[in-house]
Structures are given as structure tokens and as C-alpha cells.
Image (cartoon, rainbow, N blue to C red):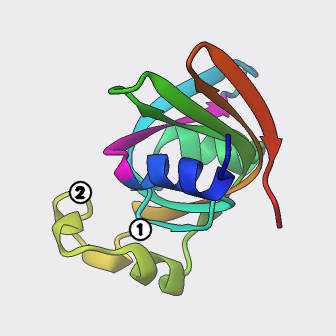
Amino acid sequence: MRDLEKTVGGMADKAKFACLSYLDAEGFPTTRAMLAPREREGIRVFWFSTNTSSRKVAAFRENPRGSVYFMDRRFFRGVSLSGTVEVLEDPESKRRLWQMGDVMYYPQGVTDPDYCVLKFTAERGRYYSHFKSEDFLIPD
């Protein structure tokens, strides 16, 4: 891969959804489809919104390890990022990601107690394209 930031960042920016994985209460990997990240900081930090009452939030509170997968169906390529997830419920983080249409999911608005933010911080990744895979570390 010639340009890690451009390739991975481009896939994340074009994604309509992402797959987010965590370890459940019994230690089994579980994957959930998520709306694409609302924001990203390079290819290290990705910001998602979700329901505080979800199983994934409970799981991340117990074990912050997780992974995010983005795929490009057209060219049958993908990237898996591994790292940690922080569950954020502070007003600043919630306002940061809030969009007007979110009231459909969180009727009480940005202060809805069932609305929270997941901050995924990647440490490493694996890129797949053209029948080949390549491991990489996320630069600081």
C-alpha cells in the first residue's frame, strides 16, 4: 500500500457503514453494523454515536478492546483496525457528534441518557486487496 493515510482514510470516508467488533460477556467476538463514523482524526481516532443501553456499550465498559472494519464492495478490498474504545457521555462529546436527524433515535435530544459516543482509537491494522493482505501499525 503506497499511502496508508490516503487508502484507509478514503475507505472510511466513503463508507456508509462500518462493522464494529467487541468481546461479549462470555468472551466471544461479536460484530455489529454501525453507521459510518461521524468524524475521524487521521486513521487513528474514529467517532461513532450509539445507544448507551446497547450490549456493545456494556461490553466496552468491561473490556475496551475492539476492532472496526471498512470495506469497499466495488473493488473487494477492506481494512480491519484494532484498538480500544472509550464510552463517552460528557456533554461536549455528545454535542460534537450530534446531528439534527438524531432526534429520531434519541427523542430527548442531545441530552438523552440513551445517547452516547464511542471513541475508537486504532493501534494497528490489516489491509486486504487483490488476494493479498498487509499488516501495519498506526503512526502517532
| Residue 125 sits above or below residue 3 on the image | above
Q: Quadrant of the C terminus?
A: bottom right
Residue 127 as seen in the image, left or right of residue 140: left
- Between 113 and 65, the residue placed more toward the observer is 65
Residue 65, image x, y percentages: 76, 42
Q: Main secondary structure of the magenta part?
A: strand
**Residue 53 visible somewhere in the drawing:** no
Residue 52, image x, y percentages: 47, 55
Report the magenta residues as a range: 14-23
- Between 104 and 113, the residue placed more toward the observer is 104
- Quarter of the rendering containing residue 118: bottom right
Identify residue type, mark 2: Tyr
- Quarter of the rendering containing residue 22: top right
- Quarter of the rendering containing residue 45: bottom right
Identify residue type, mark 1: Pro
| Residue 118 sits above or below residue 73 on the image | below
Q: Name the residue under label 2.
A: 105
Please state the total of marks drawn on the protein image.
2
Looking at the image, which residue sits at the far front?
A: 2
Q: Does the magenta stretch include residue 15?
A: yes
Q: Name the disc covering residue 113, or none.
A: 1
Q: Which residue is drawn at 19% across and 75% down?
A: 100
- Between 35 and 23, the residue placed more toward the observer is 35
Residue 128 as seen in the image, left or right of residue 16: right
Report helix, strand or loop for mark 2: loop
Residue 127, image x, y percentages: 65, 32
Q: Which residue is drawn at 37% across and 45% down?
A: 15
